[in-house]
Amino acid sequence: MADPVGTQGNGLFDRLMRIDRRIIFVFIGVALIFPLFFDISQKIPVSPEVVMTNDAFNAAPDGGLVLFSFDYDPPSAPELQPMAVAALKVAMRKHMRIVIIGLWPQGPQQANMALASVRADPRFADAKLTYGVDYVNLGFQAGNEAVIQKMGSDIPTTFPRDYAGTPVEQIPIMKGIKNLGNFDFMVNISAGYPGTREWVQFGADRFGLIMVSGSTAVQTTEMFPYVGKQLKGIMGGMRGAAEFEQISGNPGKALKFMVGQSVAHVIVIAFIVIGNVAYFATRKRKAGA
Amino acid sequence: MWMDHSGWVTLGTWVAALLTLGIMSFLYRDNPIYKFCEALFVGISAGYWFVSYFWQTLLPRLGDPLGAALTSLFGGPAVPWDIWFILIPGILGVMLLLRLIPSIGWISRWPLAFIVGYTAGLRLITFLQSNAMTQLQNSVQPVVRFSESGTFLGWDSFNVLLVTVGTFAGLFYFFFSKEHKGAFGHVSRIGTWFIMVTFGAAFGYTVMGRMSLLIGRIDFLFANWLGLVH
């Protein structure tokens, strides 16, 4: 049986074809760890989709009612938590009243962690945020898209109690909130199903929600077709989070991590180029032999 | 109490850090420590989800209303009559669990049929509206675009043209009733290129996503655990 290309021989290209994957891991690890120790920043051009997200926020009325749906869990937090924190800061700067829910069981906990991050920011130290008046966390509700569908007609029966177990009729911010039509704006932070697709289909298209999305990088390309009429903007992955932090004036972890991200991408591209050059060089030699 | 709150946080951070390193050890090669961490993760995830659904869904949505309804039968506070409707999903849920008993497992097909029917009905219309009609509406745009002041928008026009060509060429590629030859084959080939670019973009985003997750773990190790970076 003929040997696969490049598996034998000691030439440079042959050795490159047999490069141990662990060497690549070391390169990536160093690329991601090294920038953490230095105060390096990177200027990031803001994509049109994130500009649209920021414009949609600006167009929302000051003091209006905003719905945040935290549809993710800790594994996706490195990408999504920074954009959740930045979006909450923007909403609070606009003195919007915030209603938080989760279609994922761990979403409401991620929301509490994001709120804690906002409170830890010295710029928000003087913000008098009262639970139940300025914001509320209604917790998780099982049912996926059926929850959104029901929220379109009746929110108090969909979420009869908040995260801490307080009946919604005893929560001041919930007074007058009947259904999704009462919200001026909606932010969905999504890691998959149920998430942005379901909120577009059931919330935006059916009940007219004006919404933006923060999405994991993996599913962002699938959400792009909705941007425009159905989705007023999207933040895709860590880069989207960094762009939003930059354009909204709330620098955070995403901007800090983008340096490592960029260096790691350069290394991945370099290895792809090296692998292809080595492959074609050894194949050409084999063909000529 | 033998350990205060900060002590528990420290202990939790150490456990999380050691488990992270255990999982990362797979990068070198498969090993028993990795297997242990993996099994622990799967078990704890399943347990967490069960407890979460029990306390956040099963108890408040079924247990509490049913308890109140039953109490009212024995002299407790009156409840609205429609609370008894909760019995329907409750019974369907029990029927679904009968799948665990092979001799009467067939009963679980009834609630399953209900779930399939409900989901299909719910999603059919929304998919047609959101993914077909509205997408079609969004795709049909004037190819030559001008600003409000009448200036020709070259880049915008090019973008719309690109979307139009990509949409048609992509549709041609998925038209299998005619052999992809001649002019049809050429357009179909262009569609292939658009699809490949889409896959490339998706792959690029996936790489970024995976890097982000790794950055998150590295940040946890160096900032939260070791305290070397802030």
Image (cartoon, rainbow, N blue to C red):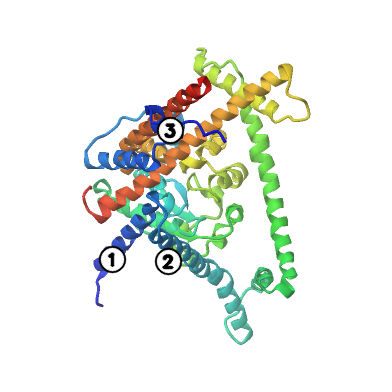
Tell me whether circle 1 and circle 2 mark residues in contact (CB < 8 Å): no
Q: Amino acid at mark 3?
A: Met
Name the secondary structure under disc 3: helix
Q: Judge if badges 3 and 1 mark residues of a common chain.
A: no
Residue A263 x %, y % = 33, 34
Residue kind at label 1, given as amino acid type: Leu
Decide if residue B137 is on the left or right side of residue A179: right
Reading the image, the residue beneath label 1 is: B11
Q: Position of residue A288 (x, y in %)?
A: 51, 19
Residue B58 at x, y percent in the picture: 56, 69
Work out whether residue B79 can be spotted: yes
User: Mark 2 or mark 3, which is nearer to you?
Assistant: 3
Position of A178 relative to A96 (above/below): below
Q: Residue at x 30, y 60 (%)?
A: B13
Q: Give the CA separation, mark 3 to mark 1.
A: 44 Å
Residue A164: assigned label: 2
Compute the Cα span from label 1 to label 2: 26 Å
Q: Quadrant of residue B94?
A: bottom right
Task: Kindly tell me whether residue A129 is visible in this rendering.
Answer: no
Mark 2 vs mark 3, CA separation in Å: 57 Å
Name the residue beneath numbered marker 3.
A17
Relative to the observer, which residue lies in front, A177 or B14?
B14
Q: Residues within 10 Å of mark 2 (few under 14, many from 20)?
A: few
